[in-house]
Structure formats: C-alpha cells, structure tokens
C-alpha cells in the first residue's frame, strides 16, 4: 500500500505546469504520471496545487547545541517544513562546534531525536572556528560531516585555507566559505555606503568579502578543491566568481533572498532586523547578483536563516548580532517578487531551491523522479497572505519582511513519504 497524491500540477522539462499524480511507496517516489491505479492506496487530494521537489537550503543556523534560546533543531526543522524545505544544511557555529568526532556525534544524536526534516551537518574547518588549528577532516567525514565551513567567520590564514582545501579535495568534500577579511571590516554593522553615512553607523566595505573570494578561488585552483561561496553580496564578488568559472576553477556560489530583494536604501533606520552579515549592499550590487544568478555564475539560493531573540535584536544596529530568519518566507517572497512579475520562470525559482543545490553538493535527490526519496512540497500559488513573524514556527522573529503580502505559500510538506506539515497544523 502506498500514498497517491492526486490532483497536482508539476513542471515538465520545458517548465510548463501539467496535471499529474504521484505514487509514493516505502518513502520513495514509485510512479509519476496520470490516472494511476488507486486501489489499495491512501489518496491525498493535492487540490490542484503546484507540487515541487522538497526544497533544499544549504545555509541554515539551527543554533542547537548551545543557543537553544534562539532556535532548536526541533523549531528550526518545523520552520523548514513550513517553508517547504525537506533538506537543510546546519552551520557549525554552535557551542560546542562540531569540530571533533565526539562533537559531531552529539549533533547527529540531536538531529536523530529532534529533526522533522533531513538535516545535514557541516563540520568546521578549524577547532572552535577559532582559525588557529585545523580539524581532522577525515575523522569528521567518517562521522557524518556534510561539508566543511567556518561560517560566521572567514578563515583568515591563506595557508590554513589552502591546507584545508587540499585535505577536503582528497576526501572529495567541498569547502564552503563565509568570505570576510577581518582586517577590512572596520567594526562595521552595515554596508559601507551612502546609507551608513546617512545613519552614522560604521560600514563594512565590499572588499571585506571580495578580497577573500579572490584569494580563495586561486587557492581552490591550486588545491583542486570544490570551493563553495556562501551568501555572495557584492558586484565584485560576482565578477570574481564569473572569471574563476570561466578559467575552469571548481567554484560554486549561493545568494540569499534578502540580498536579491533589498538594498541599503531600504534600511529604515537604526533597526537590527535589517542587520545581517554580509550586509544589504547597494543597488548595483543587487543588480549584479540577479545577473549572476541568471547567467549561472551563482548556482543556488540559500536563506542563511539566522534566528536571534527579540532582546538581542533590540540592542540596535551597532550592538545586536548579525542575521535574519529566512526559512518560512523564502519561497513566497521570491515567487511574488520575481516569478509573478515575470522576471524569472517558476522552473528557474524551483530549480535554484531544489535541483541546483542537490547537484552542487552531489546529493542525488532534489527532483521528483521515480526511485528518489519522496520529498515534496505542495504550494498554493494563488494563496495570498501577509508575513506575520509572530506566527513563525521558528523561535526567531527577526525579519525585515514582516507585514509584506505574498503569494505562493507552501500548504503541505512531505519528507520521505510522510506528511511532516500541512496548512492549519501548528
Ligand atoms: Zn555567513
């Protein structure tokens, strides 16, 4: 006996929405087609909704262990399910950091006990992400590390990054980088530009990011590593990655919804719900990010979901921690602003959030195809709703998008053949 999802619309290879049905058995997509035999199966009426592969977010901060006041694996994966994500990759800036077999083992146990969707844990490049001493990558790989990153901070030493890339290449694992040169940050809290000068808030120049990317693509070339750049935010970064790809260097990159949607000019004032790292940049940066996404320089969209408490965010731009939540708003925001407006196709958006991240990281799923894990999201493309942070499943209510009206809301999320969330469920 299986589960038959009837009355859904799916994208074909040309990006056209077609009516169809999906049969799920033993947690896998068993058959995809029309008018499949119904006998003996549980029928789930999809209500004519758009069925997309379960979304994949390669950049999520779940905070547990150590930051459970901000988020837990339970609340973070509930937020993921509500946002249509069935696979999320957890960043290692937790306490402890997954920097040893023992520490990543603890993370794996917590995931096993609490996660509602698939969580792939990153391990760190350096011990405690302190940038002083490298981790044992082979040991971490054997203990379930998904990839390596010191996200939250940049790896400052070129030599250390080079050695890490050589080891990772030997293991066939990607090195994923938050690119930031600490000598170029100048205590900044937002983008160093027109708006930071207007507000009198110290700025982070674009070169803090692009200089690191320039260094790293050369190191990746020399090491033969797969190098993935987190949350690209500047036009110079896009240009550098484009040039590196043209030179045959194995570099991939992600961009966040907020960097595609907002610029420094949108920042209303001293409000830390607009503070994230990298910061919202200038209009020409936003335009370069769009261009980079459309020409394949940037491979995927990832949220950098970074929950913090209301108290922490109340401290203002200069003192509050960096980061905003993203899992529960990504699809509707991008659909409303870029697909409904005709800038992107529905297939482009869906691919950047499923097939592309799966391909970049060699995951083998991220599409609706027979024999693959039955990870699926049903999305109501007509449903219009206002973003209300207080209703988030995430503990983090820190978003600059509260009050925006969007279309394209997930209404049912299926992970490994099981419904893990549906509309109306808390
Ligand atoms: Zn980061």
Image (cartoon, rainbow, N blue to C red):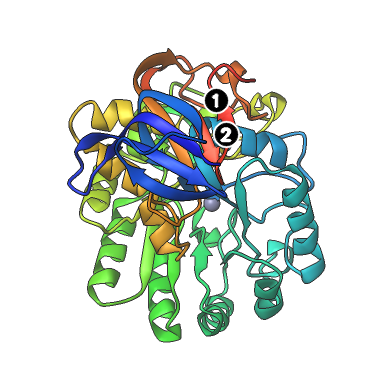
Depth check: 40 or 416 in front? 40
Query: Residue 299: x percent and y percent?
Result: 33, 56
Q: Which mark is residue 282?
A: none
Q: Helix or strand or loop: what does disc 1 sit on?
A: strand
Examine the rendering and report whether any part of residue 206 can be seen.
no
Q: CA distance from mark 2 to mark 1?
A: 7 Å
Establish whether ligand 1 lies closer than 8 Å to the Cβ of label 1.
no
Q: Helix or strand or loop: what does disc 2 sit on?
A: strand
Please identify the quadrant where the C terminus is shown: top right
Left/right placement of residue 185 relative to residue 108 reads left
Query: Residue 38: x percent and y percent?
Result: 43, 34
Other-residue count near label 2 (Cα within 10 Å), few / some / many at <14 / 14–19 / ≥20: some
Q: Which mark is residue 419?
A: 2
Query: Looking at this rendering, what residue extends furthest in the front direction?
Result: 39
Examine the rendering and report whether any part of residue 37 can be seen.
yes
Depth check: 356 or 423 in front? 423
Residue 206, compared with residue 150, is above or below; it is above
Query: Residue 156: x percent and y percent?
Result: 57, 68
Q: Which residue is mark 1?
A: 422
Left/right placement of residue 118 relative to residue 257 reads right
Could you tell me if the residues under marks 2 and 1 are in contact, i.e. CB atoms within 8 Å?
yes
């Amino acid at each position: 006996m299986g589960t038959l999802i009837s009355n859904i619309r799916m994208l074909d290879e040309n990006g056209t929405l077609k009516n169809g049905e999906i049969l799920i058995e033993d947690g896998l997509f068993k058959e995809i087609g029309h008018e499949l035999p119904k006998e003996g199966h549980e029928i789930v009426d999809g209500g004519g909704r758009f069925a997309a592969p379960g979304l994949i977010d390669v950049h999520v901060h779940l905070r547990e262990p150590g930051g459970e006041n901000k988020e837990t694996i339970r609340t973070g994966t509930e937020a993921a399910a509500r946002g249509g994500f069935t696979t999320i990759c957890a960043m290692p800036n937790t306490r402890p950091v997954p920097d040893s077999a023992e520490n990543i083992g603890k993370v794996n146990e917590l995931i096993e006990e609490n996660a509602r969707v698939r969580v792939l844990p990153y391990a760190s490049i350096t011990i405690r992400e302190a940038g002083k001493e490298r981790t044992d990558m082979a040991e971490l790989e054997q203990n379930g590390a998904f990839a390596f990153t010191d996200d939250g901070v940049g790896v400052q030493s070129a030599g250390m990054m080079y050695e890490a890339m050589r080891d990772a290449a030997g293991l066939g694992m990607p090195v994923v980088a938050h690119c930031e040169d600490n000598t170029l940050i100048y205590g900044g809290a937002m983008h160093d530009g027109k708006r930071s000068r207007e507000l009198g808030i110290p700025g982070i120049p674009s070169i803090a990011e692009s200089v690191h990317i320039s260094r790293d693509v050369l190191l990746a070339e020399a090491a033969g590593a797969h190098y993935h750049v987190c949350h690209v935010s500047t036009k110079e970064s896009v240009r550098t990655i484009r040039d590196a790809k043209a030179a045959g260097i194995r570099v991939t990159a992600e961009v966040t919804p907020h960097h595609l949607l907002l610029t420094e000019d949108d920042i209303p004032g001293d409000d830390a719900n607009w503070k994230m790292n990298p910061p919202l940049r200038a209009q020409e940066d936003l335009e370069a990010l769009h261009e980079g996404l459309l020409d394949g320089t940037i491979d995927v969209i990832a949220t950098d979901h970074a929950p913090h408490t209301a108290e922490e965010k109340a401290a203002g731009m200069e003192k509050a921690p960096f980061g905003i939540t993203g899992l529960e708003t990504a699809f509707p925001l991008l659909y409303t602003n870029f697909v409904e407006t005709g800038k992107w196709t529905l297939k482009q958006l869906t691919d950047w959030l499923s097939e592309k991240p799966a391909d970049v990281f060699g995951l083998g799923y991220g599409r609706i195809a027979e024999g693959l894990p039955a990870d699926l999201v049903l999305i109501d493309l007509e449903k219009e709703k206002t973003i209300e942070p207080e209703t988030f499943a995430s503990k983090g209510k820190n978003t600059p998008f509260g009050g925006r009206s969007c279309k394209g809301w997930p209404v049912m999320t299926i992970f490994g053949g099981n419904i893990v969330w549906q509309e109306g469920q808390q």
